Amino acid sequence: MPRFASIATPGLTPQPRARMNPGMVFAVCLFLLAPMTPKRGHKPPPPAPSDYKPVTVYDAARNPAQDLQDAMREAARTKRRILLEVGGDWCVWCNIMDGLFESHPGLQNLRDSRYVRVKINFGKDNPNEEFLSHYSRIAQYPHFFVLDSQGKLLESRDTGAFEHGRTYNSKKLAAFLKKWAPRAK
């Protein structure tokens, strides 16, 4: 009997069955499954741009509660923390802090890449007492509050700890920002 026996059907000639090479089958399976496997080291795409504008000036006319709500949405969207900077244009040390960030682009990038920044005005024209009553008492300005993306207070920091002579110590400030930044996942 021939190796490829089949049931005889009148009028048809039996054809031998084709044998598949096991290596070829394996290669075809790999080719078909390759698009389904995640790439190593592949990072998810960055979040889509938003219309959020950080609050970068002390403005007595702003509504800090609304600014915080907007910052919370942005922080959740971008997986950052919130940095409330309480002070005013009248505050010499607030202006020195602004100058430090402007003169240290790496420090500014660290802050802006890991935090959603919100300046909260405190002054005679508007002390924002109602808003600030939800946080610890502030002894001097500027003052930092670090919040998570849900608005939970994580840290209250008097910036006097960063002072160095008539300016701020950029390394101490960078260490603070790194310490309270969200953990990489």
Image (cartoon, rainbow, N blue to C red):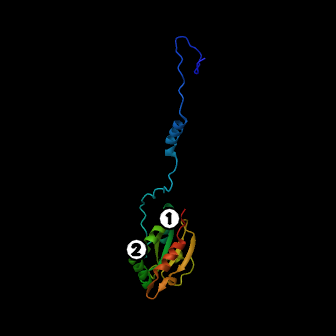
For the residue pair 168 and 89, the one nearer the viewer reads as 168
Which residue lies most toward the bottom here? 165
Quadrant holding the C terminus: bottom right
Whether residue 55 is visible: no
Numbered disc in front, either 1 or 2: 2
> How packed is label 1: few (under 14 Cα within 10 Å), some, or many (20 or more)?
many
Q: CA distance from mark 1 to mark 2?
A: 21 Å
What is the x, y in percent for residue 21?
A: 53, 33
Q: What kind of element bears circle 2?
A: helix
What is the x, y in percent for residue 67?
A: 47, 68
Look at mark 2 in the image and give the residue it sits on.
105
- Which residue is at 48% across, 62% downward? 78
Amino acid carrying label 1: it is Ala
Amino acid carrying label 2: it is Pro
What is the x, y in percent for residue 164?
A: 47, 86
- Which residue is at 45% across, 69% downward? 112
Look at mark 1 in the image and give the residue it sits on.
75
Judge whether 117 appears above or below 125 on screen. above
Q: Earlier in the sequence, mark 1 or mark 2?
A: 1
- Which residue is at 43% across, 68% downward? 54
* Number of marks: 2
- Which residue is at 43% across, 64% downward? 52
Q: What kind of element bears circle 1?
A: helix
